[in-house]
Amino acid sequence: RKRCPLCRGVVPPSQDQVANYRMKKKLAKDTSDPHYEQRVRMVKQFEAEYGEDWDGTMIEYDSDFVDLPKYVGQALLKGNIRTVLQWLGKGKVRERVNAKCEEGGNTGLL
């Protein structure tokens, strides 16, 4: 476990790490997926680093992010970059680039 160099307390994972962990754990349930072993390895690595008894505490950043529409996330997964770029161009690009999809474990475009 990572420890703070000043107080020696346990450093919790960031929101992005937790989002990535939750997404990989959800996707790792599909044993027929060709990336199954890689995802299981990543889940085990997170659990080894932060412990299986991790209490849900995490480093929180400002929560002023734009919600990523489900259709944009699905378009990205299917490789439909045109739809993603059209959505990005409809608003403030700097805000939309950092958009998060709550249904996907708060994963973002980047």
Image (cartoon, grey):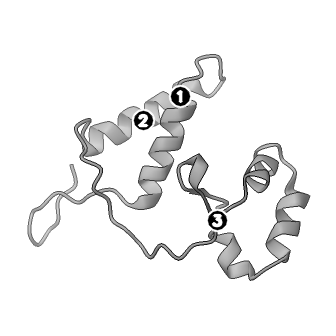
Q: In which quadrant is the C terminus drawn?
A: bottom right
| Rendering coords of residue 89 (x, y %) | 84, 76
Residue that label 2 marks: 43
Residue that label 3 marks: 67
Q: Is residue 5 left or right of residue 106?
A: left
Helix or strand or loop: what does disc 1 sit on?
Answer: loop
| Rendering coords of residue 44 (x, y %) | 37, 32
Query: Callout 3: few (<14), some (14-19), or many (20+) C-alpha neighbours within 10 Å?
Result: some
Mark 1 or mark 3: whose residue is earlier in sequence: 1
Q: Is residue 13 left or right of residue 76?
A: left
Above or below, 90 against 5 in this view is: below
Q: For this rendering, which residue is in front, 74 or 48?
A: 74
Real-space Cα separation, disc 2 to disc 1, in angstroms: 8 Å
Residue that label 1 marks: 28
Q: Amino acid at mark 3?
A: Asp
Q: Amino acid at mark 1?
A: Ala
Q: For this rendering, which residue is in front, 47 or 70?
A: 70
Pointers 2 and 1 in contact (C-beta within 8 Å): yes
